[in-house]
């Protein structure tokens, strides 16, 4: 068995370069960068021994790579993913899995050979805070889920961001805005922690704070099968913005904000207390503590290291590609609910959403986009505070 995994990268934009830097700097144990592909030559010097291919098919057929990271604009994910899987190579797809649920279904149904690993770049799954919350929920300490509420509006993006390239913030180029691009990480965490809702009603503002055609402000109400409710609010036009997650259950309340995880635990389950107390205004006694969150946030490098372990050792993936359809479905359903101006049942009818998106693409009016050079600090794109 190979002692290392030889990586190829398709797409050398900002995130593709970060993946390459993580591999070449030694942050991905047993991973080596062997080749890259982009329709435009890289604007930076490639490390010695790394081959450049202007054509992705040529890289896939070169015999130089064992695994491929796809980090192109979202609408190309399905076609490129199918090519990588068809070539028998391991695949790490940058988020989102695809731009639409229908494309995700088709990509996930593509034949794979035995042992072929297909992972998704959901880097928040390496974050100690979310893993600590997941343990609290799994251990039953939060009790029966009653409410989840996430206000994540610190994804602020100025007009300079949208002017970096002509595919950004268009229905054709991205298939959506804040939901499919920035807040997809949070949608993945929401379903990872609380499960998928059975219905939602979303209110979307399209180009409210920016000169774009896609959604940049969203507030959604969700209902879960067990009766719990949820609210998800996000924006790329609010500054300074908020990142506050609350998960309430019958045994306590979890609050994550400003890099601090607090758990207020009830002495008695709220349902049990309510059924048995004679105090008309009573409530369970509770105690608030800060939850220790051991570990280091390894982000993208951690996901790639786990991907290598899955290929070489059979380790379970942090985010199997099959998980990726869930966050895409939530993003699509919220936009669809906004378009329809009504509640949407889940699972989402992927064909109906695809038809609605195709109409939006067809009705899109081309406009002069100011493509300009701008300062790019990708570390600010991954802030979790």
Image (cartoon, helix red, strand yellow):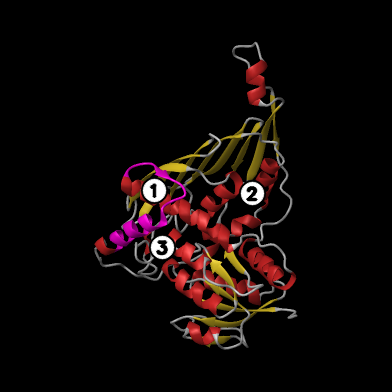
Q: The magenta stretch spans which residues? A: 341-361
Residue 108: x and y in percent read: 53, 65
Q: Of the residues tagged 1 and 3, which is closer to the observer?
A: 1
Other residues around mark 3 within 10 Å, as few (<14) / some (14–19) / many (≥20): some
Q: Quadrant of residue 102?
A: bottom left
Q: Quadrant of residue 22?
A: bottom right
**Residue at image point 63% right, 16% down:** 282
| Residue 217 badge | 1
Residue 103: x and y in percent read: 44, 64
Other residues around mark 1 within 10 Å, as few (<14) / some (14–19) / many (≥20): many
Residue 377: x and y in percent read: 51, 64
Earlier in the chain: of badge 2 and badge 1, it is: 2
Q: Are marks 2 and 1 in contact (CB under 8 Å)?
A: no
Distance Cα–Cα, label 1 vs label 3? 16 Å
Q: Quadrant of residue 342?
A: top left
Q: Does dot 3 land on a helix, a strand or a loop?
A: helix
Q: Is residue 125 among what the camera can see?
A: yes
**Residue at image point 47% right, 54% down:** 329
| Residue 130 badge | 2
Residue 181: x and y in percent read: 46, 59
Q: Is residue 47 left or right of residue 161?
A: right
Distance Cα–Cα, label 3 vs label 2? 28 Å
| Residue 161 badge | 3
> Which residue occupies the foreground of this view, 329 or 181?
329
């Amino acid at each position: 068995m190979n002692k290392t995994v030889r990586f190829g990268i398709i797409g050398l934009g900002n995130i593709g370069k970060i993946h390459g830097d993580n591999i070449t700097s030694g942050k991905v144990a047993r991973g080596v960068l062997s080749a890259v592909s982009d329709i435009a030559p890289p604007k930076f010097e490639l490390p010695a021994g790394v081959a450049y291919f202007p054509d992705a098919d040529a890289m896939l057929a070169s015999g130089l790579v064992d695994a491929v990271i796809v980090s192109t604009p979202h609408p190309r994910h399905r076609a490129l993913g199918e090519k990588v899987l068809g070539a028998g190579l391991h695949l790490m797809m940058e988020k989102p899995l695809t731009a639409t649920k229908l494309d995700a279904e088709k990509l996930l149904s593509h034949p794979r050979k035995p042992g072929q690993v297909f992972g998704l770049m959901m880097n928040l799954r390496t974050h100690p805070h979310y893993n600590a919350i997941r343990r609290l929920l799994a251990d039953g300490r939060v009790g029966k889920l009653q409410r989840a509420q996430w206000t994540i509006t610190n994804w602020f993006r100025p007009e300079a961001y949208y002017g970096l390239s002509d595919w950004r913030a268009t229905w054709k180029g991205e298939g959506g805005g804040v939901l499919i691009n920035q807040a997809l990480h949070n949608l993945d965490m929401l379903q990872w922690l609380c499960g998928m809702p059975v219905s939602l009603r979303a209110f979307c503002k399209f180009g409210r704070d920016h000169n774009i055609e896609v959604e940049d402000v969203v507030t959604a109400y969700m209902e879960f099968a067990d009766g719990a409710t949820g609210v998800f609010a996000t924006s790329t036009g609010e500054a300074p913005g908020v990142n506050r997650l609350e998960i309430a259950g019958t045994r306590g309340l979890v609050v994550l904000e400003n890099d601090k995880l607090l758990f207020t635990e009830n002495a008695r389950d709220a349902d049990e207390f309510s059924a048995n107390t004679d105090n008309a205004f009573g409530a369970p006694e509770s105690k608030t503590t800060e939850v220790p969150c051991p570990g280091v946030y390894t982000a993208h490098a951690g996901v790639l290291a786990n991907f290598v372990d899955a290929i070489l050792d059979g380790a379970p993936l942090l985010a199997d590609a099959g998980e990726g359809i869930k966050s895409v479905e939530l993003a699509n359903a919220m936009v669809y609910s906004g378009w329809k101006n009504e509640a949407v049942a889940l699972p989402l009818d992927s064909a109906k959403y695809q038809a609605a998106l195709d109409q939006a693409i067809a009705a899109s009016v081309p406009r002069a986009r100011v493509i300009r050079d701008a300062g790019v600090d990708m570390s600010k794109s991954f802030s979790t505070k």
